[in-house]
Amino acid sequence: MAPVSRHVWALCLVAWLGVAVWQANPVRVGDGHEYVAVALNLARGHAPSFAPEQIPALEAELRSLGPSFATASVNYPELVGRDGRQDVPHFWLYPLLALPGVIGALLLGVSPLWGFVALHVGLLTLLTWLVATRPAPAWTSLILLGPLTWWIDKPSTDLLLVVCLGGAMLLWSQRPAVSLVLLGIGASHNPALVLVLALFAAWGSIERPARLMCRRWQSVVLVATLLVAIPPIYYLWRLGIPSPLTAATATRWPGLLDALFPLTDVTLGLVVRYPPFVLAVMLAAGWLGWREMSRLRDPFIATSGLATLALLWVVGQPVSQNHGGSPDLSRYALWLMPLALPLLQQAGTSSHRVMQRVGVLLAALSATWTLIAFRPSRPEAHLQPTPFADWLWTHHPVWNDPRPEVFAERMSHREPPEVPTATPLCQKVLLYEGLWPVHCLPQGEPPDACLDPQRFCYANRTATGAGYLFLEEPQRPAIPLVQAERTWSRETPAVATLRQLVRGLTIGESDHALVSLRGLWNAAWLQQWSGPGRSAFYVRHTRAQAAIGVRVRQRVLARVIDLNRAVELATYPLEPHTSQPDIIPLPDASPDLAITFEPR
């Protein structure tokens, strides 16, 4: 395979960018409405904060931009300044950079979201030029041919941060001053990058001590410091806090699994979601370690490695890692990718031609993977399990125990999540304070620690299906959640009896269920199970004059059973096609009742 010329490679990257722009259909993801709102305010000559009287009209304008803005709101009561003006959690530099494009879009009568697309195209064009003109374009183009493509039409700072980090890595050897400014811009948007900036500023001074006496270097360090300082100065002046993004984050030393979450998680981790890049990093490190160790000892690689560890430590701080605004890939994994560029460059500039060929093959593999997994039209999906995670949790639940908020939000399909929760057939159950979700009848006794307040534990069904293995989750800062009203506390005789009655049935009322519920009176709650030719109801804590109303599809015999005593209390023959629902009276003060329905 002949080497691909730099010009051909540049044309390929430009074509790739053109295809991405052609597929663009701007929508809001995550906190995108904040940036759009600030940009609109700036475009009309106002401050980045909002006066109270501006907010209703601004929110109405946001909602007119499309269905993705249906719930857009800029009301944050905790971020109102002393003057009564409303600020938003994210700093306004990114909307300021998008301002020329937003003004142009408004003048042309199109959605202001296209102003952000224009900014992103400009940033990606700059990164494409840097990749094409620096060494090893095949290897370093993995940053362009990957998940970053998905963000091209979304108002989000993630693309800006990656371009800043990637540009800094590609320019460091020739323009370290420009690299520091780019890192300063990135750190001004998210405090997580401050440590990365500090490490490279320190290394730049150690690498060439004479820089400490150079006015240009001093000026650049000052500019980068000012860029980092502007957001906390603004928020201290406006709100009395250094940053809304860090005010609610408890600083702690994350455990190893928490720190590696952006890389190893089965739903959001880089290893699972973008394996071509991980393969490239492994091949590069392996080759250099085997054949060209002197290249692997490059201090630039060591500095970027330390920056990676620092960033992993910082992004391990947030309470919740299952964020929206991404295509099932942790945004922190996306930020980590540019820090591998020094290693990839060394591999791509190897004296062995085979590495150039490997780079081309990896680029082709990455482009193919991205067209399938990260095309811009793919919606964000942080409330659904990925196919791989779903298979793992249902077929081999013991193999993986994700962070509780990830499992809870993706199983309950809501944010904040409802707990306890489980997979549909209860192969994997997330207990909360020892409680089980209503569709998973308790089986076995969890450890006493699982009963502690705000404690999560996993119950993983064994390979034989005979019971569960319990795992205590580490204590972490509390996450926002909703505790389910209908739960089970432990395995009791009533639960054992109910398990026999619902064996072979599925939770809920199917379309062709034998019985249809029409009402419940004077009881705490009811849960249904149904199946072909049979149904069962569970009723918790009846009161005086308790009853249920049902309709049946055929002649049915209903049996009322006291689950604690395993005793049948009454039977009721029911007929179909009646003018009114059939009313089944229930005994008073019964903690656990079952009503079964079978054809007669």
Image (spheres, grey):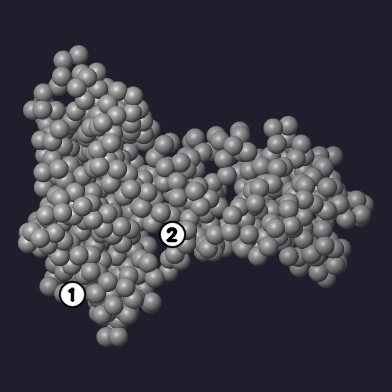
Extreme-top residue of the structure? 1
The reply to whether dot 2 and dot 1 touch (C-beta < 8 Å) is: no
Mark in front: 2 vs 1? 2
Which residue is label 1 attached to? Answer: 47
Residue to which mark 2 is pinned: 318
Which residue is located at x 76 percent, y 68 percent?
522
Spot occupied by residue 93 in the image (x, y as percentages of width and height): 20, 63
Up-down relation of residue 369 to residue 437 (above or below): above
Measured as percent of width and height from the top left, residue 397 is found at 61, 38
Q: Is residue 563 left or right of residue 219?
A: right
- Res. 14 in view: no
Q: Which percent across, then down, holds residue 391?
A: 55, 34
- Residue closer to the observer: 14 or 547: 14
Q: Is residue 516 left or right of residue 40?
A: right
**Which residue is drawn at the image coordinates 63% and 38% (left, top)?**
398
Question: Is the residue 120 above or below the residue 149 in the image?
Answer: below
For residue 297, which quarter of the picture? top left
User: At x 62% / y 47%, what residue is drawn?
Assistant: 422
Tell me: residue 348, above or below residue 563.
above
Residue 556, x across and y down, in percent: 81, 44
Q: Secondary structure at mark 1?
A: loop
Label 2 and label 1: CA atoms lie apart by 29 Å
**Image side of residue 86 versus residue 173, left or right:** right
